[in-house]
Image: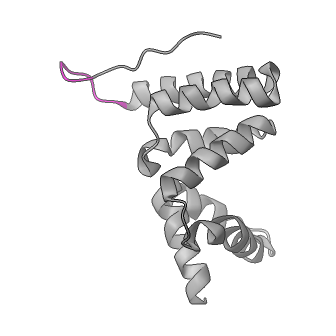
Amino acid sequence: MDYALEAAYALRRATLGDDYVDRQIGETEPIAQEFQDHITRQAWGVWTRGGELSTRDRSLLVLAMTAALGRLEEFRLHASAQARTGVSDAELDELLFQVAAYCGAPAAISARRVLRGVRAARAAEAPAGPNRQSTPTRAV
């Protein structure tokens, strides 16, 4: 594996988690590893290229683009990883207002529904206790 691909896999794992990446790589189809290398090199290699955009900035862009294009499975995946990339709940809420304004209400409403599910799953996984904080969200 070359350095660029290794760096892309490392960032993919740091963002999405080892379990997710291992499940994707672990597919049994003969072409699976080659396909995962291609996806990782293309989609995650751009995250490692340096430049003026931080990982957080790139995460916001991916969230906006996947919401705008209605790629809700990918939006869900990246919304679930927002804590690892430094994107706050408030920023993600504002992002969906931008999506609504520039890409249409249906795209933003669909992404908002997915986001509610992501947040509900996160809340269900959080340990109960007096220090647990919830993030209020507005219904669509």
Q: Position of residue 124 (x, y in %)?
A: 42, 25
Query: 117 or 26: which is nearer to us?
Result: 117
Q: Quadrant of residue 64?
A: top right
Q: Residue furthest bottom?
A: 2
Question: Is residue 110 left or right of 8 when viewed as pictured?
Answer: right
Name the residue located 43 percent from the left edge and 50 percent from the top edge.
Answer: 84
Question: Is residue 66 left or right of 52 when viewed as pictured?
Answer: right
Q: Main secondary structure of the magenta part?
A: loop
Q: Residue furthest left?
A: 130
Picture mark count: 0
Query: 63 or 114: which is nearer to us?
Result: 63
Determine if residue 64 is in view.
yes
Q: Position of residue 51 (x, y in %)?
A: 56, 70
Query: 28 or 6: which is nearer to us?
Result: 6
Question: Is residue 130 left or right of 39 when viewed as pictured?
Answer: left
Name the residue located 54 percent from the left edge and 11 percent from the top edge.
Answer: 138
Q: Position of residue 125 (x, y in %)?
A: 39, 31
Magenta stretch: residue 19 in it? no
Q: Quadrant of residue 109?
A: top right
Name the residue located 57 percent from the left edge and 27 percent from the top edge.
Answer: 94
Write down the region rendered in magenta.
Answer: 126-132
Name the residue located 81 percent from the left edge and 21 percent from the top edge.
Answer: 106
